[in-house]
Amino acid sequence: MTATHQSVTQQIAAITKAARQAQKSLAGASRADKDAALAAMANAIDTNRAKILEANATDLDRGKENNTPAALLDRLQLTDDRIDGLVSALGDLASLPDPIGNVVRGNNLPNGIRLQQVRVPLGVVGAIYEARPNVTVDIAGIGIKSGNAVILRGGSAAETTNGVTIGVLRDALESQGLPADLVQGIDELGREGANALMTYRRGVDVLIPRGGPGLIRAVVENAAVPVIETGAGVGHVYVDASADPQKAVDIVFNSKTHRPSVCNAAETVLIHRDAKDTGIKVLTALQDAGVVLHVDPTAATWVSDAVAATEDDWSTEYLDMEMSVKIVGDIDEAIEHVETYSTRHTEVIVTENLSNADRYIAEVDAAVVMVNASSRFTDGGQFGLGAEIGISTQKLHARGPMGLEELTSTKWILRGDGQIRH
Amino acid sequence: MTATHQSVTQQIAAITKAARQAQKSLAGASRADKDAALAAMANAIDTNRAKILEANATDLDRGKENNTPAALLDRLQLTDDRIDGLVSALGDLASLPDPIGNVVRGNNLPNGIRLQQVRVPLGVVGAIYEARPNVTVDIAGIGIKSGNAVILRGGSAAETTNGVTIGVLRDALESQGLPADLVQGIDELGREGANALMTYRRGVDVLIPRGGPGLIRAVVENAAVPVIETGAGVGHVYVDASADPQKAVDIVFNSKTHRPSVCNAAETVLIHRDAKDTGIKVLTALQDAGVVLHVDPTAATWVSDAVAATEDDWSTEYLDMEMSVKIVGDIDEAIEHVETYSTRHTEVIVTENLSNADRYIAEVDAAVVMVNASSRFTDGGQFGLGAEIGISTQKLHARGPMGLEELTSTKWILRGDGQIRH
């Protein structure tokens, strides 16, 4: 066991070293070079789709044999449409501006030294995710555009698909004269490889976990490398007393039902007790669409056929056609509930009252706070970032949707003429 | 043991909760309120200096009894001059612009939603440091100005000084109508308290270790909260073949001897073999000032009275009047040496050759890369940041000197009029 562990750590050491070496060729690459690499990657995914779909069928068959839940099989599955999506996403990346080299700040110091802070790649980005072969292509593309090498651990369920996809991407890079080790997979090293990647200091510059709460907690608690926590989304829509009834119905309905399985779907609606008529309209619309409501005692008197909410429901991320409902006495009670149960992803108020809108924005602590808009807008594409590697729910480095800039760091450059400190 | 540990964790839970509650009063505070608090803190430190110096004498006596090394006792010691420095640093903080509320990015989305990314406080900042009671005041001041609550673990050696200082600062905050729990110390919880602070998820938003390599490694490896790694500084000055001799002597001499005990002091000089005359001048100047040279075989033929360098010397942070010396055949060898042994803090090239300057800037991976200037300029004050909470050697969130902005996060704010996603 110890011998195996040693050997996995040594393999991770070699893989991260190869990534760091490969990344150098990208650090000095022009935007044109990187965009050409992305075009080659897009073309390779497009022309090798049969091979990728075949590998995916193997993973799907194994998943069915292992009685994998249908929702997970759906995430695991690639189709021609989904591959088209990946190809066009790589093309979109090529059309985005290159953040590398941007001057963030700069000035001349009193002693004549010229000071600049410029944007540079992070270096080596690690990603640990589950059963989403599309993430393999997304992160590889965003990594290349932002000048980083990536090391991918996509999990055993998608192992065959990821292996073939990574092979296709590596060949595409080499066809452009770039090192294949800009994109490496470590699925074959299993869980031990993932653990070694998390704990090997200075191996990766950042590690991004994408997946369920269990995966994210395991990475955050065990990693010795910098981590960006993503994704968990217990979000609320608060319908204020002054809410416009139609906006309230539209926004709550869209926030819950537009795509219930994703992190920016709302999980709880809080309704001011003076907005009872509006509230009943909101809840009825949800029920009519098949949403199971978990209601507090007051809401139970507003609608029938609802389930009584338990304490656990307030912190549950249903990711499904279910929603918790709580009637509050004032905006303070709403803010306090959000503070207690929110995962600080996306929080929405529906109101026509300016001071309540301002208070909500100021006092609710979340990556994204919205007034009169659907929580579903928390998305890199919707924000105009052009690409998204995940949605950070932590406050360090990146908060909310992470695009290309969030995969960069900075370097201070000082140009002097012999200055010394007195 | 388990019972005690439980109880310490519970205390950390209560302390971090109190910090989060206290921080709310600061989140909405105006710049004028925060500056008034800083002025009150400065005044309180000034007028309570006798009490603080008395507490410091107790720590110093205990340190002497425990045979604490002189360098550590020096760091531990407060004097009237040093207290004057702390008072004026708090005054300087008040004069700095307030980063909170700054709009980082913003635009209108195609659907009419108004999008803004604004700067907000991180929330609760933890700091773990050793035997530097001045850091207690620095971090409390920077924390308040940037809208954060701070939790301080200053270590057993400075426990009495820190306890009294924190008490003085808390009273000053209360005198301004702010909660005392904006500044809390956890020295009385000992090492177990520090461990609990590191591992209590969502307790602090960021933890900053400041101290020796052992302390920093312990925090980085054990923490389950986001950490910013600071300080370790094995930095190099590379004297290129084209270096101006006088600049080379001045810059190497200043980088090593101006203040050898700090992280931006250089530890190794790399000299191009074609710059032998310049190199001999550089090395002789260092030896004349009492610097012990650890030299490679070639440098051993350039100067006498030097020690033969060992492999360990190349990665040693002497923090003293000692320096490693290596003669290189070309700039590639210099860059490779830096890449192998640098802690990526501050790296300097002395050159008159434009393409070598550009290559060094592009290829050397460090928080700060300088051309023809002393490494001692890596400092928040020198950079014009106005305040410094440490020097980050990691790439995530902050890199190089960290000022007020580095203690902030951002929040996305969306203002709509009923928009939903189609």
Image (cartoon, coloured by chain):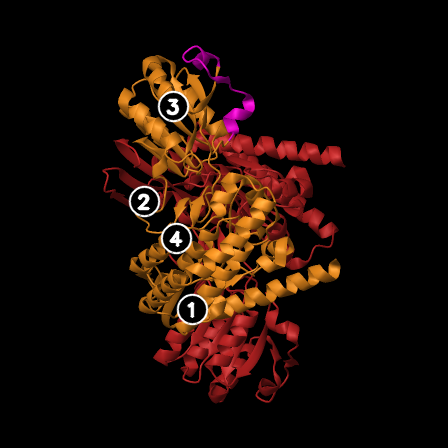
Chain colours: A orange, B red
Q: Residues within 10 Å of mark 2 (few under 14, many from 20)?
A: many
Q: Residue at x 45, y 44 (%)?
A: B142
Circle nearer the N terminus (1, 4) = 4
Residue designated by label 3 = A286
Where is residue B48? Give x, y as percent.
53, 37
Residue nearer the viewer, A204 or B197: A204
* Amino acid of disc 1: Leu
Tell me the quadrant of the picture where the N terminus of chain A can be found. bottom right
* Amino acid of disc 2: Phe
Residue nearer the viewer, A340 or A381: A381
As helix, strand or loop, the secondary structure at mark 3 comes to helix
> Mark 4–mark 2 contact, CB under 8 Å?
no
Q: Residues within 10 Å of mark 3 (few under 14, many from 20)?
A: many
Q: Is residue B80 visible?
A: no
Q: Residue at x 64, y 83 (%)?
A: B305
Mark linked to residue A383: 2
Residue designated by label 4 = A80
Circle nearer the N terminus (1, 3) = 1
Chain to which mark 3 belongs: A
Magenta stretch: residue A127 in it? no
Residue nearer the viewer, B105 or A379: A379
Where is residue B25? Give x, y as percent.
43, 30
- For residue A138, which quarter of the picture? bottom left
What range of the chain is rendered magenta?
A297-316
Rounded to the nearest angstrom, the CA distance separating label 2 from label 3 is 27 Å
Circle nearer the N terminus (4, 3) = 4
* Amino acid of disc 4: Asp
Rounded to the nearest angstrom, the CA distance separating label 1 from label 3 is 48 Å
Rounded to the nearest angstrom, the CA distance separating label 2 from label 1 is 30 Å
Mark linked to residue A173: 1
